[in-house]
Image (tube, rainbow, N blue to C red):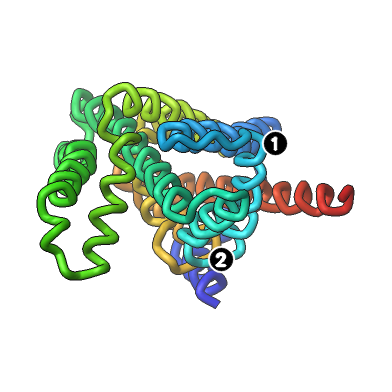
């Protein structure tokens, strides 16, 4: 019900007929390219996950991780809580023989790498916007937030590592002990410079492909906004769609893009149209994942 309500509100407040008209006149070839780019993010994410698991000493097959990514994407698309896909990934990895702690830690580190990759791209976009003199307060605040994220995640892990080393013996709480042990386990993938650089490189590559997909979608609906703005737009929209309100962020994505477009002086209807195209792309990828799984199941 939340999904239908959000879509109905967006349709009413943003002018659904105008948005539909813009989407209807979109370039289908560019939408197809946006779809292909968005779909290619899934195997790139699997490569990042494989690298993380190898830093933990595990060596699963890449094909198996790609399959798990497809399954989690399909299941996650039908649920309001976006974190459900992470639970599915951890459970499926455990079913292959991996330890639960390893499965959970690898999924968490994968999420953190994704967040840091987004922060780096958003920081770059904020600096570009600031040099142009665009919305100084908005992009200045964005740059500061990105720096806090990039510095805060490693700092918290260092603190957890120190706490785990020096204070775990005296800790009575089982929950706190488990947390300290868990934090020390993910240290190799996030605090060792070599691993951090490779992980971030893979993450930025995947995020860049997703960014190109969004820029292509904007071109498809002839949106008049600088491509560099999407460096900041995409992390904000991603964070907004993580709020458990609607399925795959329907309605939330369109409203977020509309607000961001309006903030930089672009037409809000164009922003909502970009969001609508990307929502359709995400749903299409989820259906593709489901079809691939059904076909694979039928072959077995």
Please provide percent x and percent y for residue 139: 21, 38
Please provide percent x and percent y for residue 92: 59, 54
Question: The residue tagged with tag 1: helix, strand or loop?
Answer: helix
Foreground: 152 or 228? 152
Foreground: 209 or 277? 209
> Height in image: 287 above or below 33?
below
> Height in image: 199 above or below 294?
above
Q: Who's the residue at 45% across and 68% down the image?
A: 245
Asked where in the image residue 109 lies, by quadrant, the reply is: top left
> Height in image: 123 above or below 185?
above
Q: Residues within 10 Å of mark 2 (few under 14, many from 20)?
A: some
Please provide percent x and percent y for residue 205: 46, 26
Q: Nearer the viewer, mark 1 or mark 2?
A: 2
- Residue marked by disc 2: 79
| Relative side of 151 to 77, left or right | left
Foreground: 115 or 1? 115
| Relative side of 258 to 77, left or right | left
Q: Tell me if residue 21 can be seen.
A: no
- Residue marked by disc 1: 28
| Relative side of 298 to 171, left or right | right
Question: The residue tagged with tag 2: helix, strand or loop?
Answer: loop
Q: Who's the residue at 22% across and 64% down the image?
A: 176
């Amino acid at each position: 019900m939340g999904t239908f309500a959000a879509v109905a509100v967006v349709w009413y407040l943003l002018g659904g007929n105008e948005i539909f008209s813009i989407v209807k006149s979109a370039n289908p070839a560019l939408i197809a390219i946006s779809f292909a780019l968005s779909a290619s993010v899934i195997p790139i994410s699997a490569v990042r996950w494989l690298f993380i698991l190898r830093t933990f000493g595990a060596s699963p097959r890449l094909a198996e991780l790609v399959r798990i990514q497809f399954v989690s994407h399909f299941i996650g698309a039908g649920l309001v809580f976006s974190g459900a896909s992470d639970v599915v990934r951890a459970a499926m990895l455990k079913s292959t023989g991996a330890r639960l702690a390893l499965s959970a830690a690898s999924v968490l580190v994968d999420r953190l790498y994704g967040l840091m990759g987004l922060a780096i791209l958003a920081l770059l976009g904020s600096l570009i916007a600031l040099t142009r003199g665009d919305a100084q307060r908005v992009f200045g605040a964005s740059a500061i937030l990105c720096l806090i994220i990039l510095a805060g995640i490693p700092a918290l892990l260092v603190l957890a590592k120190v706490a785990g080393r020096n204070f775990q013996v005296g800790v009575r709480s089982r929950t706190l002990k488990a947390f300290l042990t868990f934090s020390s386990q993910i240290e190799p993938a996030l605090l060792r410079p070599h691993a951090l650089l490779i992980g971030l490189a893979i993450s930025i590559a995947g995020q860049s492909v997703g960014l190109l997909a969004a820029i292509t979608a904007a071109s498809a609906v002839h949106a008049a906004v600088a491509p560099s703005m999407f460096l900041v737009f995409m992390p904000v929209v991603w964070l907004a769609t993580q709020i458990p309100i609607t399925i795959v962020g329907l309605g939330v994505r369109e409203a977020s893009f509309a607000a961001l477009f309006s903030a930089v002086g672009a037409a809000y209807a164009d922003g909502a149209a970009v969001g609508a195209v990307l929502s359709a792309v995400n749903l299409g990828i989820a259906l593709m994942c489901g079809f691939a799984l059904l076909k694979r199941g039928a072959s077995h």
